[in-house]
Image (spheres, grey):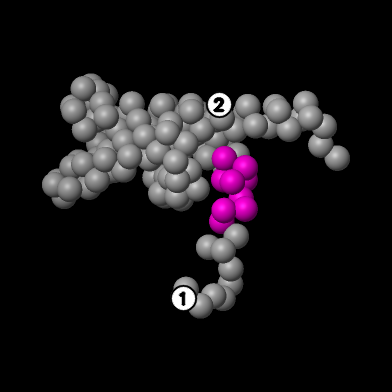
Amino acid sequence: MNTRHEQSFARRFSVAARVLLGLLFFASGLANLLNLAPQPALPEGAAAFTGALMNTGYMLPLIFGTQFIVGTLLLANRFVPLALALLAPFVVNSLAFHAFLERSGLPVAVAVLALLLYLAWAYRKAYGPMLAPKTAPG
């Protein structure tokens, strides 16, 4: 049985997690779209991976644009389950990038994953229809 205090804490923590994740991706996406963020020196494998994304001509703007839009949706508290679903592949790739290519960002990537998983759990009812094993078109 949930007490009123536990419900209030869960609601406040969900809002804090959503706003924190929103600010992170809004600011990161905007800074990178406008080339305001300095590019750090990267280990060889990480630099090669980033260079390959850059050489496509579209992938980095797509990633940064998606981060900006997702951050905006999270901050505006609109389409939050959709924003989290769009964010999930980026967060998983970010975790892998930092686990295998550039270890210094791993703690932040793990924290972002934890926030994403918490919010996905908090909004789990919205994912029910999407996760049905069999469904028919509407």
Residue 29 drawn at (x, y percent):
30, 33
Q: Main secondary structure of the magenta part?
A: helix
Per the rendered image, the range of residues in magenta is 119-127
Look at 60% across and 39% down and name the residue there. 118
Badge 1 is on which residue? 137
Residue 116 drawn at (x, y percent):
52, 40
Residue 45 seen in render: no
Q: Quadrant of the N terminus?
A: top right
Look at 46% across and 76% down and name the residue there. 137
In this rendering, would 79 be left or right of 37? right
- Distance, label 2 to label 1, CA atoms, is 36 Å
In this rendering, would 101 be left or right of 124? left
Look at 58% across and 72% down and name the residue there. 133
Badge 2 is on which residue? 16
Disc 1 marks which amino acid?
Pro
Q: How many marks?
A: 2
